[in-house]
Image: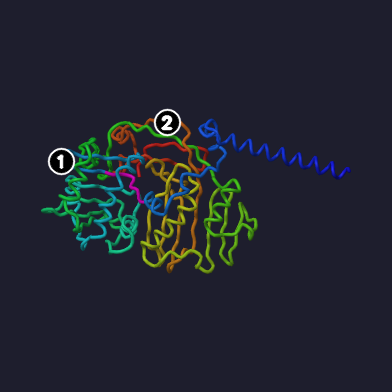
Amino acid sequence: MRNKRRWIEWGKDVLIVLLTLSAIYLLTMTPLVQDSGVLDLLSPQESPGTGLSEEESRGMVMLPARLAVTGEGGRYGVQYNEERLKELFPPLGALLGDALASAGTPQSITEGEWRRYLGGTGVYFDFQGEVPLAALKWWLQGPGDASPSGSARRVLLCAGTEDQVLLCWQEADSGQFFCCSTALTQSLHLDPAAESSTSNGAYFAFEGQELTRLLDPYTLITEGEQDREGYDASVPLTGGAGVAAVLEALDYSAQNHAPVSGGEVYLDGGDRLVVSTNGTVTYRAAQPEKYPVGKDIADQVDGVRALAERTLGTLCGEARLYLMSAQEEGGALRVRFGYLLDGCAVRLGGEGWAAEFWVEDGYVTRFTLRFRCYTANGERALLLPVDKAAAMLPDLTDERRELVIQYWDGGGAAVSPDWVAV
């Protein structure tokens, strides 16, 4: 009898639980709860970098930091404004991809010719870092036709003779200027792109009487004060979820690990992955087969870009990654990435970069990732216009240098912008 009563009471409890769950479910289906935003708060929150397709991920890393379009009505320049750059770049980037895919034999040009081309009808791209042209072409158009060799930060599509469109750039290592023909035409491609933009008075430092004495000649000048956002900064690996996400992205098991000074070491055969409490992650390969990235430079740069994006890129908050450099050193390729905040570079510690990869014989043999997460804190900094800042900075009196807005991150809890001579 007692057991029967116990079963009846247990059945009542189960029925109460089921009725409660049913009531909660029906409540969540009502418009009041659906529109309240409560369900959004209960859902798992992704960082801005997650959920991007491979094409979108490439699009972010190749987005220029500066863009200028020059036509008959003047020049329209944009910098330190990522949303505007995202609007302008897709059609202009498609033109650049077509130009790279159809590029003829490069010819050396003088600096005077380069400046003359900058002053005429054209589209100017400043990628902030030194981008291999082969990788740039791959990101813009995909694998296929050959593209010019070498790396460049500054690239220009400009009007040539007759109806021709030229592709020009300043080579990163030597500083020399080059130019080649393309399959584009002025009437069908360049003129429509240039006519679509209205002048906002942007100019290069060499075109101004005062600033040409102070600044690097190819500093892009956009008028007015700069109202910039401040950001809180943190290490996103302090919780278990961040470390777990990184281990999964790098195909490491969370089981095989041991404590080391300042962190944990994770093992995969002889390969070692060290996750430090300060947010630095280092990898050293014993047998370099874990991360194949191909043999040519475009594949290698894109391969390490993918590694950077699915690790740093998913946990960096409101920042994005950009390619700083890809250089051959002693038979290996060293590739570095940095953080950008709304088009402004973040100088991370003494080195400046956020990620460094080494590629040998088509495999990543070692890398260092420096994890930081940036969140806008609502504090604003009103900076002087660039011409006034240039006149006040003592760093510019001895040597003409470029003046840029930069965030310096020394490991503190916040970063703020300032004019910096680089």
Q: Position of residue 30 (x, y in %)?
A: 55, 33
* Residue drawn where x is 29% and y is 40% of the image: 78
| The magenta stretch spans residue 65 | yes
Is residue 33 toward the left or the right of residue 293 in the image?
right
Colour scheme in use: rainbow
Left or right: 47 with respect to 72?
Answer: right
The residue that label 2 is drawn on is 380
What is the span of residues highlighted in magenta in the rendered image? Answer: 62-67
**Distance from the alpha carbon under mark 2 to that under mark 1:** 36 Å
Figure quadrant of residue 419: top left
| x and y percentages locating residue 196 in the rendered image | 22, 41
The picture quadrant where one finds residue 359 is bottom left
Q: Residue 361 at what x, y percent from top left?
A: 43, 69
Work out whether residue 258 or residue 420 is closer to the camera in this orientation and state it. 258
Name the residue beneath numbered marker 1.
Answer: 72
Q: How many C-alpha atoms fall within 10 Å of the one at disc 1: few (<14), some, or many (≥20)?
A: few
**Residue in view at x 29 percent, y 62 percent:** 149
